[in-house]
Image (spheres, helix red, strand yellow):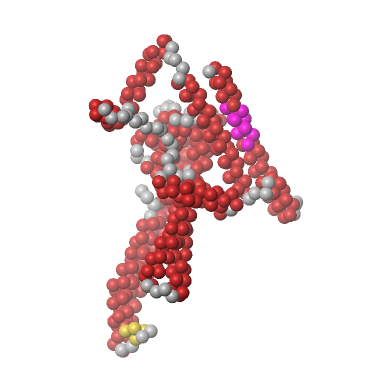
Amino acid sequence: MKEDLKQTAALIIKTVDEIDIHKNNFINAKKRIKELEIQLNTKQITKSQFNSNIDSISRGKTKDQFILNYEQKILSLFDDIESKLTDITSSISKTPQMKDNKEKQSHFNDEIIKNIDKTYIKDLVKKKKRGEELEIPDYILYKTKRYGFISNFFMEKFTRYLVINYDNLFLSLYKSLKSSGIPILSKTYISMMLLSTLLSFILSSILFFLIFQSLSIISIINSLLLGIIFSSSILVFFYYYPSIVSNNRRRKIKNDLPFVIVHMSAIAGSGANPISMFNLILTSGEFKGVEGEIKKIVNYVNLFGYNLSTSLKLVSTTTPSKEFREFLNGLVTNIETGGDLGQYLNAKASDAITTYKLDRKKYVDTLSTYSDVYTGVLIAAPLLFFATLAIIQVLGGEIFGITAKTIAVIGTFIVIPVMNIVYLLFINIIQPEV
């Protein structure tokens, strides 16, 4: 047992060294690329020399591929450390407890009893009385849904082929999927996207063919074309849906961030530990926008055993909000350099509140402009238009063969209501959340 633990610990140290090597190589490569860009801008090297040097640094990959490759390597090494730590924890949990640890064990059992789901215990007691077999659920981080399983079954090979040979097509999808917080693997999501596109093409083509009710070549071609259009819209929706979710999360995080920083500043002023700030914010339940990101930080520390700096770095790589990413990186720098955390949070809180007020003022100014547009387009213009129609009606004229009365009815009951609805939807979309 002791020798196994030593070997596992040595492997963890070796993995940490590999992470440092990859990190340093990545930093040096970025510095070298920046130097080459400066040399290119100052015409010290030619464009061909610049491209040649960039290819040698990135090994023929694009900049996004180069960055994504290093991120995946580092994250895989972190996953390796996590699995080894889990092995160590399970090994230690199997060793017999010493007698002098009875008091600690009793306290630990009390904590377990407090956190037990009482409903689950009642169900176990009922099953025991009925003589039913007791099932202990396993703890899993991710479980594939039924549709995801079916999609992988039919499309996994084709998905792997596309990802390997045309990975450039999925770079933006990877980034938006990672920042959206959707609990699904990227490979499974692509398989679902492809299967949904295929099924929508088949079903929509059959549906349009039944609508046309004709066996002619033209109806078949039209059905297939409409099926292609419909399935393409499904493909586009799947591709951009994570981006929509990510943008929505970004907006919510941006709206909550100033108040979160003020809250953290108040907690830090009381002398609490840095991780306590995140625990208190999470348990308060007041900031739904950043709750998912804070929960990741707390889980990295309490569940996976990472230190706070590493947890903040990991969350900063996946958060969709630029402002929250900069705030987390600033926290990391402050913690690692031993700066005054309370002073840093006070300064950030002041800046965040000032920015929040400026954004709201900017929105109010923009809204006043939109109100002027509304007055001109949806109030004054219809009045002039109907006055013109009244004159045309008196003269007995028509517009493009349509009588003035018909145009007035269409404008009154269709055009103007639709334009007002569109305007209200637009205002609702651009309105920042309070």
Any magenta on residue 271? no
Above or below, comparing residue 13 to residue 210 in the picture: above
Above or below, comparing residue 89 to residue 43 in the picture: above
Callout count = 0
Above or below, comparing residue 243 to residue 403 in the picture: above
Q: Is residue 30 left or right of residue 79?
A: right
Q: Quadrant of residue 227?
A: bottom left
Q: Is residue 29 left or right of residue 138?
A: right
Dominant secondary structure, magenta: helix
- The magenta stretch is 12-22
Q: Is residue 405 left or right of residue 194?
A: left
Residue 107 at what x, y percent from top left?
36, 18
> Which residue appears at 29% of the width and 74% of the height?
412
Residue 423 at what x, y percent from top left?
36, 64
Q: Nearer the viewer, residue 274 or 373?
A: 274
Residue 134 at what x, y percent from top left?
32, 29
> Which residue appears at 51% of the width and 24% of the height?
88
Does residue 376 appear anywhere in the picture? Answer: no
> Which residue appears at 43% of the width and 60% of the height?
200
